[in-house]
Image: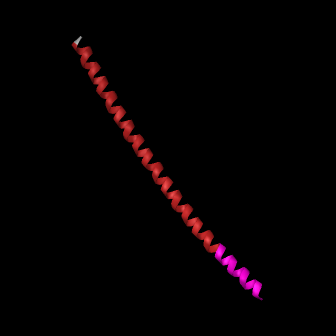
Amino acid sequence: MIKHRKDSIKAINAAKRAAAERDATLDGAVAAVAGVEDALCDIDAAVEDRLGVIEDALCEMDMIGGQE
């Protein structure tokens, strides 16, 4: 009976450790996803900036072309 109880306690403790490891893994995954999201936002902002530069250049070209 005592051995069974000790084995049960060991199993419970092992399950707690496994749950803690899963939680840590999930926390890491959440952080990784947040990092990817931040990177995508940075890329989006850079693309928007580039599009603005291209749009400005096209407007200037149109103005120059219209004056000739």
At 66% from the left edge and 73% from the top edge, which residue is drawn?
A: 55
Which SS type dominates the magenta stretch? helix
**Quadrant (top left, top right, bottom left, bottom right) of the N terminus:** top left
Q: Image quadrant of residue 28? A: top left
In this rendering, the answer to whether 2 lies above or below 32 is above
Q: Is residue 57 magenta?
A: yes
Q: Residue at x 45, y 49 (%)?
A: 32
Query: Going by the image, does 43 lie left or right of 32?
Result: right
Question: Quick one: 43 or 52, which is closer to the camera?
Answer: 52
How many marks can you see? 0
Residue toward you, 51 or 8: 51
| Image position, residue 47 (x, y; %) | 59, 65
Q: Hey, which residue is sitting farthest bottom in the picture?
A: 68
**Above-or-below relation of 30 to 65:** above
- Please, is residue 3 above or below residue 28 in the view? above
Indicate the position of residue 35 as horizontal and vertical percent values.
Answer: 46, 53
The span picked out in magenta is 55-68
Q: Is residue 36 left or right of residue 25?
A: right
Residue 60 within the magenta-colored segment of the rendering: yes
